[in-house]
Amino acid sequence: MIFDVVHTDGAARRGRMTLEHGVVETPVFMPCGTYGSVKGMTPDQLKEVGTHIVLGNTFHLWILPGEELIHSLGGLHGFMQWPYPILTDSGGYQVHSLRDLAKVDDDGVTFRSPHNGDLLRLTPEKSMLIQEQLGSDIAMAFDECTDFPATQQDVRKSMLRSMEWARRSRDAYNGPGTLFGIVQGGIYDELRYESLQTLRKIGFDGYAIGGLSVGESIEEMFEVLNSLVHQMPEVSPRYLMGVGTPSDLLRGIALGVDMFDCVLPTRNARNGYLFTSSGIVKIRNSRYRADPKPIDANCLCSTCDRFSRAYLHHLDKRGEMLGATLMTIHNLHYYHNLARDARDAIAEDRFAQFNTATRACWNASDE
């Protein structure tokens, strides 16, 4: 990986990552392709809406169809026919999200498969091997996403375990891509700083911020980010994992974050919850039953170019798959367009004005 910060505007950064499968301009939003696909979207549609890089879920792809099968069919790029960059998580988040099925010890995690109940064992070494087989451009170190709330003592124990797993991940990874470390430490600034310093000593190509958006308030999350992001290496990409809303993206970019991922735009689209330049449209509301307007008159996506709110309301009410696809096209286009406009604003030294003006147009409730 080659990463260059090409311009700064305050703390906000415009950058460029050169990876094996292409160039990614930052700040960037990365759609989640948990099972090897972004739900309802073909690779061509993803490219059309402005996607530069997608995520794959190491844990779920390991369970089905298995990393060896994917490797035999050209790695994840060939398997899902996405010739552009891919980031794979490590499976560590499933320690948190599947905690009722998991038992953690210092060596790794034992799971009951959510697919068939089989007993599974995931360690840093196993996670690295899976990601090597998947062939991702960016792999993530194996970590434990700490529960919230938790005492400082418990969080420190979890953070230190993640740091040991980070060392083992660094030693074990021999894949075709680059490896990022993950900063843990809950909402405790001193633990976050200790985690970051440990990761820097180990040495990673990029640094992610994990263990947020897991139950803490938005203000608690940004208190952590306010104290942490400026301490992260300036020469490396900074990745805020699992966040978030359009407002979260702009606040993160203002602090110097480069990369974001979240299921929000795709999941919300499937539930008729659409992001627009003036706020939120909840397409299931009866007011849209005969509305001839597009979702957003200011949007240039193919959905807004061709289809009315009335049609999308109808498709959603009938449970038609096409409705979910058309609304996902719109939401992803909105997120990618927001990131692109932020990049342009940074390059032109007007990010603060762009941030203020964009937020001023949003209404909290349905228009």
Image (cartoon, rainbow, N blue to C red):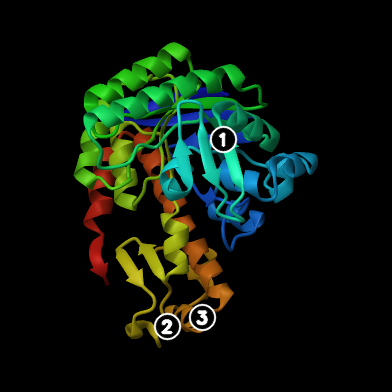
Residue 52 visible at all: no
309 relative to 321 in the view: left or right: left
For residue 87, what is the image quadrant?
top right
Q: Of 21 and 188, which appears nearest the observer? A: 188
Measured from the top left, where is residue 251 in percent x and y? Answer: 28, 42
| Residue 340 vertical position relative to residue 264 in the rendered view, above or below | above
* Callout 2: SS: loop
Residue 292 got which mark?
Answer: 2
Please state, as top left, top right, bottom left or bottom right, where the N terminus lies in the image. top right
Residue 25 visible at all: yes
Camera-near label (2 vs 3) is 3
Q: Of 296 and 247, which appears nearest the observer? A: 247
Disc 3 target residue: 315
243 relative to 266 in the view: left or right: left
Measured from the top left, where is residue 291 in percent x and y? Answer: 39, 83
| Residue 333 vertical position relative to residue 237 in the rendered view, above or below | below
Which amino acid, mark 1?
Answer: Leu
Mark 3: few, some, or many residues within 10 Å (few <14, many ≥20)? Answer: some
Mark 1: few, some, or many residues within 10 Å (few <14, many ≥20)? Answer: many
* Circles 2 and 3 in contact, beta carbons < 8 Å: no
Disc 1 target residue: 122
| Residue 359 vertical position relative to residue 306 in the rendered view, above or below | above
Which amino acid, mark 2?
Answer: Pro
Measured from the top left, where is residue 29 in percent x and y? Answer: 45, 45
Indicate which disc, 1 or 2, sits on the residue closer to the N terminus. Answer: 1
Mark 1 and mark 2: Cα distance apart in space: 52 Å
